[in-house]
Image (cartoon, rainbow, N blue to C red):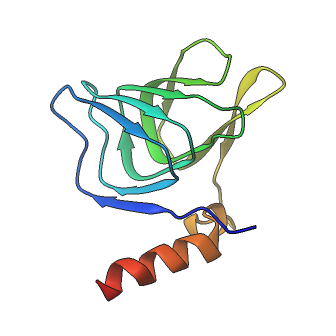
Amino acid sequence: MPQPSIGIHEGNLRYAREYEFTEPLILFGNIEKSVSVCAKANLYVLGHVQGVLDFLYADCVLYASSLCANVRIHDTSFQNLTIFSPCKVYYEKRELKIEMVKGEKSWEKQLQLPLVKAALEKAVSH
């Protein structure tokens, strides 16, 4: 089965806009508090996350450097999360779960390396 592609976006999401992502995305930037995001796949944010993030499916995961945002995954209610260090937010047993990225863990271990490497190589080759 083919692996889904990963999109790459460099720059902040801002200006009170609504964004919709249907494929996994690596964001090199921040999500500002006036922004609303609807995602159908994983979101990897190498920056600070604010605003409202609504993930539609139970297997969606948010990875962020830090966040102060309202987050919902699948059938949970929106939760205001404030976390000042790298984290993973995911769905398990009808609840949002948070896993802190500490010590021996790094972004390289959190990201799906084969997919990320392929996406980065594709971006560099263009």
Q: Nearer the viewer, residue 121 or 103?
A: 121
The image quadrant where one finds the C terminus is bottom left
- In the displayed structure image, the side of residue 29 where residue 113 appears, left or right: right
Picture coordinates of residue 56, whole percent (x, y)? 59, 28
Q: Nearer the viewer, residue 36 or 70?
A: 36
Task: Name the image quarter holding residue 88.
Answer: top right
Residue drawn 25% across and 42% down?
Answer: 13
Picture coordinates of residue 77, whole percent (x, y)? 61, 11
Task: Name the image quarter holding residue 27.
Answer: bottom left
Picture coordinates of residue 119, whole percent (x, y)? 47, 73
Task: Name the image quarter holding residue 34.
Answer: top left
Residue drawn 64% across and 66% down?
Answer: 112
Residue drawn 43% across and 77% down?
Answer: 120
The image quadrant where one finds the N terminus is bottom right
Picture coordinates of residue 3, whole percent (x, y)? 66, 67
Q: Outermost residue, front direction?
A: 1
Q: Compared to 56, does 89 lie above or below?
A: below
Q: Compared to 47, does 36 lie above or below?
A: above
Q: Outermost residue, right direction?
A: 93
Q: Outermost residue, left direction?
A: 15
Q: Outermost residue, bottom direction?
A: 125
Residue drawn 54% across and 71% down?
Answer: 116
- In the displayed structure image, the side of residue 32 where residue 62 appears, left or right: right
Question: How many tags in the picture?
Answer: 0
